[in-house]
Each structure stands twice: as C-alpha cells, then as structure tokens.
Image: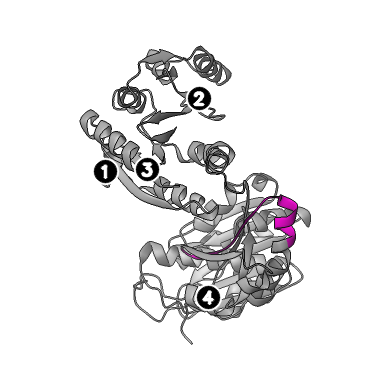
C-alpha cells in the first residue's frame, strides 16, 4: 500500500508550529507495518491544496490529510476535497446535532461558523471524533482513498488508533491485530541500549518482533512491535522478550506503555498512603508542575516550593543562613533541608532539588553538581551528579527527570543512584 500524508496549514508551512502530527501518524503506521511513501506540507491556499490532493490521488493508494477541518475561513479541507472529488458539499444533520449537543453540554454558545464543520462532500463517509467538533471523513479522489483528520493532536491520536489504522489494515488485507510494547528509560544513551539489547529480537520463534527506539529527551523510548491474527497470541509471543528487556535494562526503566515516571510516583505514593512535598531551585518548578497536573495528585501532593537561589530557599524553610548558598553543598545540608520541608508541610516524603553553586554563580559553567535529597522521618537518600549536558532548558529538563527518577527509585526501594551515561566520571 502506497501511503501519503498531507499536512495543511500556514503555521506548519512557515515553521511557526512544529509539525508533530506528521511524525505521530508516520510512526503509528510504521508500527503496524504500513510504510509512508510521501509527506507533503501545504499552506491554507486553495490552488495549492487542490494540486496536492490531485497529485496524491494519482500516485498513492491511501492519503491521510491532517488539518483544515475547523470553523474558520482558512479551514479549507472539506471544500477542496469536494472540488477534487467532483462533488458538492452537503450538510450532515447527524454531525450538526453532535456539535450542538457538545456546546450545550459545556454551557457554551455555538457560533454560526461552527455549522461549517458539518458540511461534508456528498460521497464522504463520516469518521467519528468523540472528543471534538471536527469530524473526520473518507472519500475517493482519483485512484486513492483519502482520510481527513483534525489538526488537534489529542483528537487525531484517538481517531488514528480507534478508527483509521483499523480501516487501513482491513483495506490492505493485512493482519488486523498489532501490539506495541513501550519501555521508557532514563540515564542510558540510545547506542548503549542498542548494545544491551543486541539479539533480543531473535528470542521470538519466528523473528516477528521488531525492536525500535525513539528519543524523547530526557527519556529514551524502547519499542517492541509485533503483528498477527490474534491478540492473545501476540501477548504470549511478546512476554519472554518483555521480561528480557526488563532484565537487561533493570532499574533504568522508569515506566512502561502509557505510564510516565511522574505517574508512577503519584500512584506509588497513593498506594502507600503517603504524601509529598517538593522544594527546587535550578529546575524552576518543573518537578512540581509534572506532578501536580496528574489525576490523583491532589490527594498526595502537599506542597511545591520554588526559589531562584538557595538563600531564598533557606529563608522559606527556616534554615540557618549559608547552608544552601554560601559554599559547596553536602549530604548533611541536603538532608537538613528535606527534613525541614517534611516538618513544614506535614508530608510523609520530601524531595529537595538543588545545584551546587553559590548564589549568583553562572549555571552554564561546567563542573557544577546537581543534588537531590529524598527523606521521610525514618530514612533518607541523597543523589549527586555532575551532568555533561550544559545549557538552559535542556539542563533543567534533565535535572527534573533525574529528581523524579530519584524519587521513583526511593519509593520502589531501589538504589537511588546508579551512574548514568550523561554525567562526568
């Protein structure tokens, strides 16, 4: 099956918006054995769009169009699809009722231009969008079957998984069951993990399991992909390979599938009937932000303190001056800060994340140390690291990940420190 993806929108074409939708669609198709032959980006221009649709309709078997289904004047996908297919637009009363019901449910007034989202080409088959006002649809243009999807990532992802991929697999006559097992690791580089997992695909009796990697800084995603005719059989085929991945990567696996390191922290705290307070300087609130947004966080996340420098954190925690700001940090100072946070917040667990520098020092200079202290009233653990990666947001994101990973390890009774690939010896 020859597949083309067309992404529409001036914001995509000009680079104002990073086109993550294309990579998501292509990756999802690749995971189920459907390779993309062409990728096209087109602005919100009628002539350019119809030229792109007609060209794709001549050279591809299947075309996925992303974007242009909104209510505004620059959303042109329905109009151009109908023109390219040589049909008119008709009002889909069913979808119009769905839009109106969605606005009523949220207590909002529906604007007249939202009615445009229920106009579909006459020959189109509706593809349901359970969480948005823009329905998808499919129809033939030229020799290809076109599938139109909304540009909102959350809506696209759901429709792709639940409807479009199954339709493509059925249309292509391929096996309709696919499984992708994902592991999220922190602290190991891609080449290192590749060597650790060498030969792991051969554990499948028919060599049908494919190993893949994708970097989502600061984590690395390891994927095992397999296709077949029955889900139970796929799961049995994957089970020994999954176990071997866990054995080889060990404690560096922070989460699996749709879990994240922060969701693991929240669920573990809830299961232990525990609570958490966080204090951070260099990370600028990133740790607290990643935790606080999750469902269930309100029952376990007691407090997040953010200070630009150690001296202000000392003041907030009521510590003696200089312990966190006047000189090199040490384990004793970090534990003292964590214990003060415990007492002040009433939480059962405290995490303190600091950088070893005097107030006002240049954080971009190499050689400084990241410090993390996790404490309860009964025990504590301290982790320090000199990262090789220096530079602004990347450093803060990596430090936040290290802090969350340290907390995860503490909660799971694992060694809080194991040397990672991205720090000095």
- Foreground: 26 or 359? 26
Mark 1: which secondary structure? Answer: helix
Answer left or right for 64 relative to 271.
Answer: left
Residue lying at 39% horizontally and 28% vertically, measured from the top left: 69
Q: Which residue is mark 2?
A: 126
Q: Residues within 10 Å of mark 4 (few under 14, many from 20)?
A: some
Q: Residues within 10 Å of mark 3 (few under 14, many from 20)?
A: many
**In the rendered structure, which segment of residues is drawn in magenta?**
217-236
- Foreground: 155 or 378? 155
Q: Which residue is mark 4?
A: 194
- Please tell me whether mark 3 or mark 2 is closer to you in this view: 3
State the image quarter where residue 358 is shown.
bottom left
- Disc 2 + disc 4, Cβ < 8 Å: no
Residue lying at 54% horizontally and 75% vertically, measured from the top left: 193
- Please tell me whether mark 1 or mark 2 is closer to you in this view: 2
Residue 249 placement (x, y as % from top left): 63, 74
């Amino acid at each position: 099956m020859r597949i083309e993806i067309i992404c529409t929108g001036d914001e995509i074409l000009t680079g104002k918006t990073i086109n993550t939708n294309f990579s998501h669609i292509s990756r999802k198709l690749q995971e189920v054995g459907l390779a993309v032959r062409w990728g096209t980006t087109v602005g919100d221009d009628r002539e350019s769009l119809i030229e792109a649709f007609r060209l794709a309709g001549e050279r591809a078997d299947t075309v996925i169009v992303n974007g242009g289904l909104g209510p505004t004047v620059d959303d042109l996908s329905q109009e151009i699809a109908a023109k390219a297919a040589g049909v008119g637009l008709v009002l889909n009363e069913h979808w119009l009722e769905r839009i109106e019901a969605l606005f009523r449910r949220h207590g909002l007034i529906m604007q007249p231009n939202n009615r445009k989202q229920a106009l579909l080409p006459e020959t189109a088959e509706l593809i349901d969008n359970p969480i948005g006002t823009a329905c998808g649809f499919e129809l033939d243009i030229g020799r290809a079957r076109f599938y139109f999807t909304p540009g909102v990532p959350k809506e696209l992802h759901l429709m792709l998984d639940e409807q479009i991929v199954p339709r493509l697999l059925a249309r292509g006559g391929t096996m309709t069951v696919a499984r992708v097992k994902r592991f999220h690791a922190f602290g190991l580089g891609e080449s290192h993990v590749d060597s650790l997992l060498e030969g792991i695909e051969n554990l499948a009796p028919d060599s049908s399991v494919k190993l893949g990697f994708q970097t989502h800084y600061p984590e690395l995603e390891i994927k095992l992909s397999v296709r077949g005719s029955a889900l139970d059989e796929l799961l049995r085929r994957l089970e020994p390979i999954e176990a071997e991945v866990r054995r080889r990567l060990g404690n560096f696996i922070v989460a699996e599938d749709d879990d994240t390191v922060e969701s693991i922290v929240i669920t573990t705290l809830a299961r232990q009937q525990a609570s958490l307070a966080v204090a951070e300087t260099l990370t600028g609130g990133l740790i607290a932000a990643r935790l606080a947004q999750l469902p269930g966080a309100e029952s376990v996340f007691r407090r997040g303190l953010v200070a630009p420098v150690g001296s202000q954190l000392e003041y907030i925690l009521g510590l003696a001056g200089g312990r966190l700001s006047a000189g090199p940090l040490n384990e004793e100072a970090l534990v003292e800060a964590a214990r003060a946070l415990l007492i002040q917040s009433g939480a059962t667990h405290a995490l303190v994340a600091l950088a070893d520098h005097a107030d006002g020092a240049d954080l971009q200079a190499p050689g400084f140390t990241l410090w993390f202290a996790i404490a309860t009233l009964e025990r504590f653990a301290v982790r320090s690291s000199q990262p090789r990666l220096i530079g602004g947001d990347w450093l803060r994101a990596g430090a936040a990940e290290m802090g969350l990973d340290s907390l995860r390890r503490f909660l799971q009774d694992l060694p809080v420190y194991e040397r990672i690939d991205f720090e000095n010896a």
